[in-house]
Amino acid sequence: MSNAHSLRSVSILATEGVFASTLMQAKDFFHMASLRLARQLGQPLQPAFETRLVSPDGEPVSSFSGTSIAVDGALQPTDAVILPAFWANFDALSTRYRQVVPWLRQQHAAGSAICGEATGAFWMAHAGLLDNREATTHWRFAREFSERFPRVQLASGKHLTDSDNLYCAGGTTSSCDLYMHLIERFCGANVAQGMARDVLFEVQRSYSPGRLGFGGQKLHLDTRVLQIQEWLEEHFAEKFRFEDVARDHGMSIRNFMRRFQAATGDKPLHYLQRLRIETAKNLLSTTRKSIKTISYEVGYDDASFFARLFRQHTELSPNQYRQQYRHKSG
């Protein structure tokens, strides 16, 4: 259960014009996770961590639809920041709430995870946190975002991005995946899987949220290795030799192995296995395909070998993993 005890608080930013639905979705997700984690830790009568609604001045805000939303307090140190979507003039917001930018910079410097949903990513970019990093936002605001923040590498075609503890989600469904990713990171797989089974079973995605965890491994300056990472994301299920991949990218196998691990922190084979396993996790949770078919689709002809590898990476068999996500009626 990695980092479970290090999570003390999650702060969700409320500002004028916030979409109340995105604000409360984050509140409900993390509150549910805190209750599940407390039960798992043997403390069932209280949440394992705080989930707080905060506003820049601690005062209530008026949502997009005109609802007055009370908050739990003003900005404070926290382990995770959620920046929900809003519909408002950003120049007016950023002028009115000058406290937000230094707060975000301080939290990021202290190691907090910062997550922006749709227009929430504007705050991160305005604080300079996304300069020279990949980010995404809702497609409707992509042009404004790119014009305001030319230093940000806007990947408008991506639903999710991850760079140095900075996460962006393009919309509501992808933010669900982002929150589940963070809940798995902070609260462990059992809590995340239980929540996904209860609240996400009906969602059928057309993309793989599992790729999210690889964004942080692209925070390096070796452009050749970046090219190879992108190649692997496109061809991970194919049969190939790393010797050929290295040669095709102008490197000897020895130089490739050294540079890849130095840049990403992973050996190429382990990185490839993770790509395949994360894709398999998505297929197991969102399709009814057989284990053998999934094994083949992610690049393994031997389903028993795939199952052993899957257990090494997740501590669950493919069937056990699928059961965690299957809705149990009655």
Image: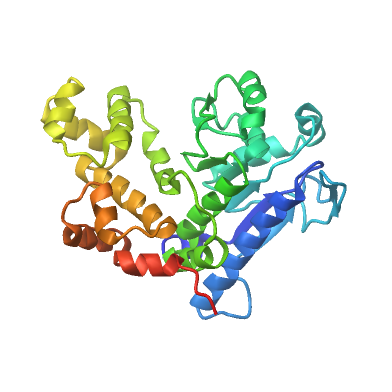
Seen in the picture, residue 213 relative to 93 is either above or below; the reply is below
Res. 324 image quadrant: bottom left
Q: Position of residue 22 (x, y in %)?
A: 69, 50
Q: Nearer the viewer, residue 228 or 185?
A: 228
Residue 303 appears in the rendering = yes
In which quadrant is the C terminus drawn?
bottom right
Q: Is residue 305 left or right of residue 135?
A: left
The number of numbered badges drawn on the structure is 0
Q: Position of residue 285 (x, y in %)?
A: 42, 59
Residue 315 appears in the rendering = no
Q: Residue at the location (81% across, 51% down)?
A: 58
Seen in the picture, residue 67 relative to 207 is either above or below; the reply is below
Seen in the picture, residue 38 relative to 292 is either above or below; the reply is below
Q: Residue at the location (35% across, 49% down)?
A: 279
Q: Position of residue 27 (x, y in %)?
A: 67, 58
Q: What's the image's color scheme?
A: rainbow
Q: Position of residue 145 (x, y in %)?
A: 64, 25
Q: Is residue 312 left or right of residue 247?
A: right
Q: Residue at the location (31% across, 38% down)?
A: 264
In which quadrant is the N terminus drawn?
bottom left
